[in-house]
Amino acid sequence: MQIEPLEFEKPIVELEKQLAELKDQTAGQDIGAEKEIGKIEEKISKMKYDVYQGLTPWQRVQIARHTQRPFTLDYIDQCFDDFMELHGDRHVGDDDAMPGGFARLEGRRCVVLGHQKGRDTKENLLRNFGSAHPEGYRKALRLMRLADKFGKPVVTFIDTPGAYPGIGAEERNIAEAIAFNLREMMRIKIPIVAVVIGEGGSGGALGIGMADRVLMLENSYYSVISPEGCAAILWKDRKYAEDAATAMKLTAKDLKGMNVIDEIIPEPLGGAHHDHIAISRSVKTALIKHLSELRELDGDELLEQRYEKFRKFGEFRG
């Protein structure tokens, strides 16, 4: 798969292109090019290490938005078996931006759902660019209530710039749909694990994020607003998005340091889009670990710990 490079990755890509050309030109010839090839390979390795170990928050936001990153349905395909998608919210209709249904994780039945983006114009229009409508959140709650009824855990994948803010969504009460999810997820007596796999924007993310354990991929972000939105409000210009990303403390490392999330899942060098199989294995391992721990707790213990987890946010002691 040809990976589309981000702006800060282009020097690395250019060197890799030069290396490939040199190897093609010297293939089958004994002209002593091995030393030069070795130097370029060493330079590429050092450049990759320096770039990816020193990523800025804004660069991580760019990686989180990469269209070739694995999306919810990719993780469902790689991590789960026997996925059976369920449709509709039983009020208005279905929402393709929020697929979900029953599946098996290591042979155990569970409910899995999440935001789904698209990789081209046609798919993005179908998935509404990952921004769910009210019926998406109501469908998600319907599936979680089914999980509660049958005593099965819930796994949610968060990847959205935010809930859809259009007129139709407002008419069907998007704010109420999200608020209702927040309340009801605090009452469901089964384990819930949420994974931020890309963008975790605003209430659209939180609407399926009130979980016992919240995990984040290394290059994802989780925030009350997008960096561009923050820049437009504070600096009156979206061009300050990079400054906003730094000020907002939206990276996985920042949020782990503030105990907002429970674990950071490392990504392959360069980001999850460089190796879908490897990142899926890491996500699956983390899900199995946390669900195994949560199964040891009864319903009342789960609710008490979940309640305390979110009540502690924003507490600071001198």
Image (tube, grey):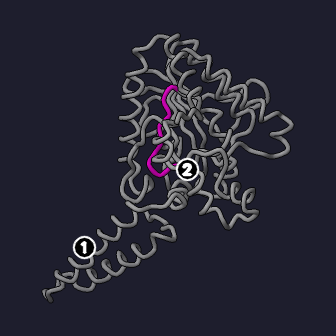
Neighbourhood count class around disc 1 (C-alpha, 10 Å): few under 14, some 14–19, many 20 upward: few
Q: Is residue 20 left or right of residue 193?
A: left
Q: Are marks 2 and 1 in contact (CB under 8 Å)?
A: no
Q: Secondary structure at mark 2?
A: loop
- Where 24 sits versus 53, above or below? below
Measured as percent of width and height from the top left, residue 235 is found at 72, 62
Residue drawn 48% across and 29% down? 213
Q: As drawn, is 207 to the left or to the right of 174?
A: left
What residue is drawn where x is 69% and y is 32%? 137
Residue 14: image location, x then y, percent: 40, 78
Could you say which quadrant of the image residue 108 lies in?
A: top left
Classed neighbour count for the residue bearing mark 2: other residues with Cα under 10 Å, few (<14), some (14–19), many (≥20): some
In front: 27, or 133?
Answer: 133
Is 53 left, or right, of 216 in this rendering?
left
Asked if 224 appears above or below 107 in the picture, the reply is below
Circle 1 sits in a helix, a strand or a loop, which is it?
A: helix
Hey, which residue is sitting farthest front in the picture?
Answer: 318
Q: Which residue is mark 2?
A: 249
Residue 7 at least partly seen: yes
Amino acid type assigned to the residue bearing label 1 in the image: Glu
Q: Magenta span has 219?
A: yes
Magenta span: 212-220
Give the CA distance from mark 2 to mark 1. Answer: 33 Å
Which residue is under mark 1?
A: 42
Whole-percent x, y for residue 304 in the image: 54, 15
Q: Residue at x 71, y 42 (%)?
A: 163
Quadrant assignment for the N terminus: bottom left
Residue type highlighted by circle 2: Lys
Q: Is residue 164 left or right of residue 223?
A: right
Q: Residue farthest to the bottom?
A: 31
- Whether the magenta-drawn stretch holds residue 300 is answered as no
Which numbered mark, 2 or 1, is in the foreground of this view?
2
